Amino acid sequence: MIRIGSVPYLNSKVLVYGLQPQTERYTFETHVPSVLTQKLRSGAVDVALVSSIEYFLQPNAYSILPSLSVSSHREMWSIQLFYRGDLRDLKRVGCDPSSQTTNALLRIILHEKLQLKTVVEPLQLGDDPLEYPELDGFLKIGDPCLQFVPPAGYASLDLANEWHSFTNLPFVFAVWLARSGVDLQHMNSDLFLAKKEGLRRVDDIAKAEAPALGLEFKRTKDYISKIVKYDLGREELGGLDLFRRYLLRMKMIEPSNGFDFYAR
């Protein structure tokens, strides 16, 4: 039986549409990115939709399932830096502990694109960044970001849009990774078909998810059908490789070879 894991966010719903908690062939569970990554590393799941940085942090540990990702070609809506004052005067910002990829992207935008010396401080899960007066800003991701209404005086920066204006490439937030040596028994094909079915059923997904998130149907549908992208083609891989090169430059990962794709 194949053990599948994914994140619980709206941006993953198209990719996992129709998957059941358990069948005769697989089990399916969801966790925030940081927890899901640990489960994949420990072998508690066999294949998971995890933060893209994980592939570079664990060289030779995984293969990538082709044609599938959570990506952005421009804006993303759910990856925002909220800040007060002038952007150029940011001294300290808090990062979200649930995703290493978005925290790395935050550092790239602040330090490489904007050439700021802003200190990026990790927060704990459940922390309210507004309770830290020493912070000039903070990162919010996923569904909590879509639901968040910033207080008066706060502006926002869409990190995916900043990446695109910096590189003219998509940004890949998450990919399906299979542990090396695991035989997915054709689940790779099933996950590809799940994406196709999810794209066909975006209205149904939006109707189901919008009330639970407190979002309007149109905004929910637009997010999963127009904003989030789900392919992993040449452009996306170009963005992913450039992300790798920035991680190397900032000494966040060790050198590694190219992409290893899963094939049964």
Image: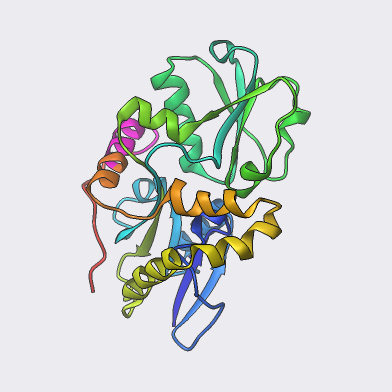
Q: Is residue 98 left or right of residue 130?
A: left
User: Which residue is at a point 69% across and 39% down the rendered structure image?
Assistant: 148
Residue 110: x, y in percent?
47, 22
User: Which residue is at a point 67% across and 44% down the rendered structure image?
Assistant: 147
**Stretch of the chain drawn in magenta:** 241-253
> Which residue appears farthest toward the bottom when viewing the image?
24
Is residue 101 visible in this depiction of the protein?
Answer: yes
User: Which residue is at a point 56% across and 56% down the rendered structure image?
Assistant: 10
Quick check: is 248 in the magenta stretch?
Answer: yes
User: Which residue is at a point 45% across and 67% down the rendered structure image?
Assistant: 198
Q: In the figure, residue 89 lies in which quadrant?
A: top right
Q: Relative to residue 121, is residue 21 depicted above or below?
A: below
Q: Is residue 44 left or right of residue 138?
A: left
Q: Is residue 87 left or right of residue 216?
A: left
Q: Is residue 40 left or right of residue 262?
A: right
Quick check: is 209 in the magenta stretch?
Answer: no
Q: Relative to residue 26, is residue 163 depicted above or below?
A: above
